[in-house]
Image (spheres, rainbow, N blue to C red):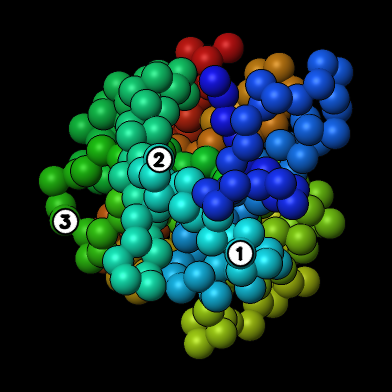
Amino acid sequence: MRTTLREDSDEGTDGVTDESTRPAGDNKGGSANLRALERALDVLETFNDSKAPLRLTDIAKRTNLHLATAQRILAVLERRGYVSRADRDYRMGLAPLLAAHTYLTTSELTLIATPVLQELMLASGLTASLFVRIDHARVAVQRIEGPTPLRYQLPIGQRLPLHKGIGKLLLADLDDGEVKELVSASLAATPPAEREDIALPALLAQLPELRAQGYIVAANERVAGTAAVAAPVINSADGRYMAIASVTGLSKDIDDARAEALVVEVRRAADAISTRLS
């Protein structure tokens, strides 16, 4: 017997309903189930940009859901391990970690990129990474640590802004309207105390040049004392950017001459990933 989330008035106390009782050809039930699924995903996504536990009222406010509806959805997600609860505090559960592991071990992109990034790390002596764009952020989906420790930790899956550092290369593949929307969404998801002014005209003016040259060198932009070089992994079918490959190190170790040599290595790695994916 399959059960799904609903928000209709005939929901049970845990927010699920038995589909086996629906009349054949009842499309209203299917539409309600899709709406409930979207709301459940909205609830899960509220945790993506939160660095602290959330209360029920916080979740309901951020998702524009009635308190009772949010509570029913959370009850199902908690039972399935997607969220955990301590007293009145909700956190992301372990189930998404298992899903992430499945992605990393089955994704064609990460499987193909991993040996290339290992070679890139050995050739450069720097930390090699692969980033993809997810909504308004860039996310590391693979990372091979270099021998020299960096000044910060960057776990797989952590969201980083697109408008800073090498993230701008992912924006270079988009039109101005898309860039404005993503920057606006990024600011909206940033806590007020951490927001910053973004010179959008200057950012938009920089993107065509990045697209034309096919790489980016960034120093001391997102984290002081670090520098990075990145190049796009291009989908041969449509020419769009699937990801960016990069190397990162201490800015004092990457002068102009070193950066020029690194551009060659990083572009070679990005091209190798693109070719093997085609």
* x then y, percent, for residue 257: 37, 52
Pick whichever, 42 or 209, lies toward us: 42
Horizontal relation, residue 267 to residue 134: left or right: left
Q: Which quadrant does the N terminus fall into?
A: top right
Q: Which secondary structure lies at badge 2?
A: loop
Q: Nearer the viewer, mark 1 or mark 2?
A: 1
Pick whichever, 165 or 133, lies toward us: 133
- Residue type at mark 2 is Arg
Q: CA distance from mark 1 to mark 3?
A: 48 Å
| Residue 124 figure quarter | top left
Q: CA distance from mark 2 to mark 3?
A: 38 Å
**Which residue is the site of mark 2?**
80
**If you read the primary sequence from the N terminus, does the residue marked by circle 1 or circle 3 appear first?**
1
Residue 225 visible within the image:
yes
Numbered tag placed on residue 193 in the rendering: none
- Residue type at mark 3 is Pro
* x then y, percent, for residue 60: 61, 68
- Residue type at mark 1 is Ala
| Residue 197 figure quarter | bottom right
Q: Which secondary structure lies at badge 3?
A: loop
Task: Write the residue at 54% across / 61% down.
Answer: 71
Horizontal relation, residue 108 to residue 68: left or right: left
**Which residue is the site of mark 3?**
149
Pick whichever, 232 or 193, lies toward us: 193
Numbered tag placed on residue 68 in the rendering: 1
Task: Write the residue at 75% across / 25% down.
Answer: 22
Crowding at dot 2, Cα within 10 Å, few <14 / some 14-19 / many 20+, comes out as: few
* x then y, percent, for residue 32: 77, 40
Q: CA distance from mark 1 to mark 2?
A: 19 Å
